[in-house]
Amino acid sequence: MIGISPRRKEDQRLLSGGGRFVDDLTRDGLLHLGVVRSLEAHARVTKVALDRARKISGVVAAWSAADLDGVAPHMPTAYGGSQKGRAWSQPVLARGVVRFVGEAVAVVVAESPYALADGLEAVTVDYQRLPALATAESALGSATKLHEGWADNTAIVAKGAVGDAEGAMAGAHLVVHEKLRHPRLSSAPIETRGAFAYKDRESGVLVVSSSTQSPYTLRDAVAAALKLPTESVRVVVPDVGGGFGPKGPIYPEEILVAAAAHRLGRPVKWVESRRENFATMGQDREQDHDARIGFNRDGTIVAIDATFLADVGAYPIQGDGLTANTVNHMPGPYRVAHYRNTGTSVVTTKALNAAYRAAGRPEAVFVMERLMDIGARRLGLDPAELRRRNFIRPADMPYRPGLTYKDGVAVSYDPGDFPAAFERALALLPYDEWRRRQKSQASSGRRIGIGIACYAQGTGLGPYEGATVRVDPSGKVYVYIGVTGQGQGHATTLAQIAAAELGAAWEDVVVSAGDTSQHPYGMGTGGSRVAANSGPAVAQTAREVRERAARVAAEMLECAPEDVRIEQSRVHVVGMPDRAVSLGRVAHAAVKSKALKATGEPGLNACTYFYPDTVTWAFGTHAAAVSVDVETCEVRLLAYSIVHDPGRAINPTIVEAQLQGGAVQGIGAGLMEEIVYDASGQLLTGSLMDYAIPKADQLPPLPVALDEHPSTINPLGIKGVGESGAIPGAAAIANAVEDAVADLGVVVREVPITPARLFRLLGR
């Protein structure tokens, strides 16, 4: 089953209208919760007036921070961990100070959405305005400190170094020094955030549903915030309409909904508006880099020396994780003997920073690949040729760049053939044909440009994932996992693994996730980790169940366990296919069979966990061809190609779709997407009228080639895929646009390259 592409199990239900998202959930007596949000980017809250709201017909409750007795005042730390860097806390409701526009100040709970709207409008908040910290650079130089007790607005610093970058740079033939910027982005999921909670009358358990990627973290956070035993909180995640990372953290609204249901004894639901989503869901990517790269005369890289500022918003919930990603991923697939980089996370009066698909890697690739193209132009080399001269070679594997990953393990690249995969991407575009077309249109008003971007990506971060596999006497095989899906196809791919390892028919396998009562622990979906961590967990658990089935079947068929074969849910004796029983009959017998005495447990059931030693490393290349109208400054994407090494593709069609979806997000970052705040910290891109995302008619076909080199980190050979497509797009687009108009003196130093920005670059 591994390596083929059966149709996805989950799609029929969704396409026929059977999906159930947070806003579809309801129970008798449902109450609606809404949030009063700060209108100021930075201010002291001097008064929250709730009396008028409380008197409105249909309003059940209205609370400020002062009313939350019995609820933790600040967001709990996941799994009881401690924060890295300087001490800070994020309030469940603002207490005394607000730090970004949209921060929760009060809540209103009402019988209907109409009464809720009236109640929210009746709440008044008085503010004493404080200076806004609009950018990381201005925050570093400001006398205003966002968090009490801090000497400045630096949250944490991430560093990486190997060799002697400064000394080596002095001997370089060419040094390229640039200041480059990647914009702040929203993940803009189709479904905004939402939460629903109620208290089960029979068990007393508080049941919470949320559009989240992290059900177990949410369970633990709610229990800690409400001072409840963890076992008295159950999280059930319904269908989720897109997550992409920013639905991974736990937000104050989820705690508030749970607290309201617990306190009022009635079901409570909150679903945010699109404007709230843009203002309050975690954002990512805003980094400003000052980078130098040195080259020898032949184009080989001598050294890289860089620093950057990361704007992490009001609360640095990611610690140094994202900046460390940028530091570790900057050298990419190239041999870099001398490297130094320092990333400084700075708090500002913006929405908090969350890990958006590929988190820290697109920024690194944007900087590195821009430096490579600028260097190629100054050296008189084709950009493709410069990369060929610097790739890590297959013979160098496992390549160790000398850096330490954020899991504390020395970085070691998995087996791969970067040069060969690169050539496949060029052929898929096709690169040489576009170069010929570029020359033929060089004197026209509509120029052609070609851009390339490459990456090496750490994927599949631990510490673990697990699986429970149970064979029902009906013959159905149930797989319970601790990771939830937001469209990735887990119910299909993990069923393929279970079927392959157990010997069950794929149609008989049912994958269930998102219910903390079904499986004890899970680390959540993100970091391209599901296939690389949950996949091996499902495989080893299915193998254990297969061994148990063989013991029981041997007793039934009067043979040795090693002579039992299980294929397509049929259990038979090797070489004697007629001596057979169904897998369901074996499961039925296993409930009482003494053949399982040695295992200490009846039934065809097992639960195991897979702990990877460290991350797997994947490689990929994207190539783009664009047309640039030098009169109107319109940029149009003409062609695009994608090559990625997934290690071993479980379901190639799903892998290709993941890469295409990610590529569209990277293309959006290159051409149109950007969260913009003004100097006073007010959000200017608070709707889809202001924040542009790519549309289908703006995209050419996105062909994909998979270049498989199995990983050595997990027994299935899997490398991550989920984030990979989003990594190089902005860099490839920037390189392509500059390639089209470089002779006009244009150097692209930031994205997105909108017509207005290109107009300014052309000096109009």
Image: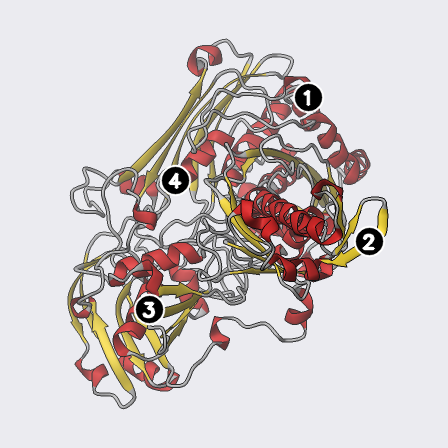
Residue 447 x, y percent position in the rendering: 71, 42
* Labels 1 and 2 touching (C-beta < 8 A): no
Q: Mark 2 points at which residue?
A: 579
C-alpha separation, residue under disc 1 versus residue under disc 2: 49 Å
Sequence-wise, the earlier of marks 1 and 2 is: 1
Q: Mark 3 points at which residue?
A: 258
Q: Can residue 9 be seen in this view?
A: yes
Neighbourhood count class around disc 2 (C-alpha, 10 Å): few under 14, some 14–19, many 20 upward? few
C-alpha separation, residue under disc 4 versus residue under disc 2: 66 Å
C-alpha separation, residue under disc 3 versus residue under disc 2: 55 Å
- SS of the residue at dot 4? strand
Residue 578 x, y percent position in the rendering: 85, 54
161 relative to 438, above or below? above
Sequence-wise, the earlier of marks 3 and 2 is: 3
Residue 101 falls in image quadrant: bottom left
Q: Nearer the viewer, mark 4 or mark 2?
A: 2
Residue at (21, 83) in percent of width and height: 54
Q: Which of 745 and 735 is in front in this view?
A: 735
Q: Nearer the viewer, residue 91 or 44?
A: 91
Is residue 112 shown left or right of residue 640?
left
Sequence-wise, the earlier of marks 4 and 2 is: 4
Q: Which of 741 and 314 is in front in this view?
A: 314
Neighbourhood count class around disc 1 (C-alpha, 10 Å): few under 14, some 14–19, many 20 upward? some
C-alpha separation, residue under disc 3 versus residue under disc 4: 33 Å
Q: Residue 394 carries which label?
A: 1
- SS of the residue at dot 2? strand
Residue 551 x, y percent position in the rendering: 66, 47
Q: Name the residue under label 4.
A: 310
Kind of residue at badge 3: Ala
Name of the residue lying farthest toward the left: 46
